[in-house]
Each structure stands twice: as C-alpha cells, then as structure tokens.
Amino acid sequence: MIVRVTLVCFLLVGAPIKSEAEARPRARPVPIYSNQFAVHVPEGVEAATEIAEKHGFDNHGQIHISMNIK
C-alpha cells in the first residue's frame, strides 16, 4: 500500500516537472521563408489576377469560400 501511494505521489509531482522541461520552445537555426501567401482583394477575382500579374505572381484563386481573412 505504501508503495502505491508513493508511486502515485511521484507521478503526480514528477510528471509536471518533466512536461515543463519538454515544453520549452526550440531555437530555429535557420529562418523559414515561404513562396506562397494569401491576400484579400475586395474588388474580386479579376482585380486579384491583375494585381498578381502586375507584380509577377500567379493567382491560384480563392482559398476557401468560408474563410474570412482580414
């Protein structure tokens, strides 16, 4: 019985300490850059395509009909 109580106490006290040590953010050695992004163009698809072409990009269309990007 004493062994069970000790084990339970160890697990309850020891587990949060271990998880806090593992929860630290890792330093990223190299920045990550993406060649894809989303923009909101309220004027519509034609205006978005025109803006993309003007700046040398491709318009791949709307991401998702229910997304509300601001």
Image: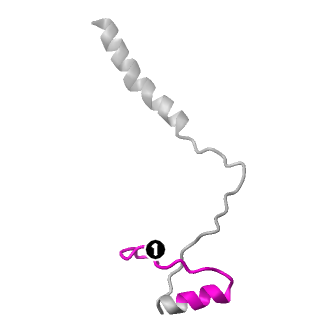
- In the image, is 30 to the left or to the right of 50? right
**Quick one: 11 or 66, which is closer to the camera?**
66
Residue lying at 64% horizontally and 64% vertically, measured from the top left: 34
Task: Examine the rendered structure and indicate whether residue 26 appears above or below residue 18.
Answer: below
For the N terminus, the image quarter is top left
Residue lying at 43% horizontally and 27% vertically, measured from the top left: 15
Q: Quadrant of residue 7?
A: top left
Residue 59 x/y as whole percent: 56, 80
Residue 2 x/y as whole percent: 31, 7
Task: Examine the rendered structure and indicate whether residue 25 appears above or below residue 16.
Answer: below
Residue lying at 56% horizontally and 87% vertically, measured from the top left: 49
Q: Is 52 colored magenta in this rendering?
A: yes
Amino acid type shown at disc 1: Ile
Main secondary structure type of the part rendered in magenta = loop
| Residue at the right extreme, as displayed | 30
Q: Is 5 colored magenta in this rendering?
A: no
- In the image, is 4 to the left or to the right of 51? left
Residue 11 x/y as whole percent: 39, 22
Q: In which quarter of the image is residue 31?
A: bottom right
Q: Which colour scheme is used?
A: one colour
Residue ID for mark 1: 63
Residue lying at 52% horizontally and 40% vertically, measured from the top left: 23
Task: Write the start and end of the magenta stretch as one range.
Answer: 48-70
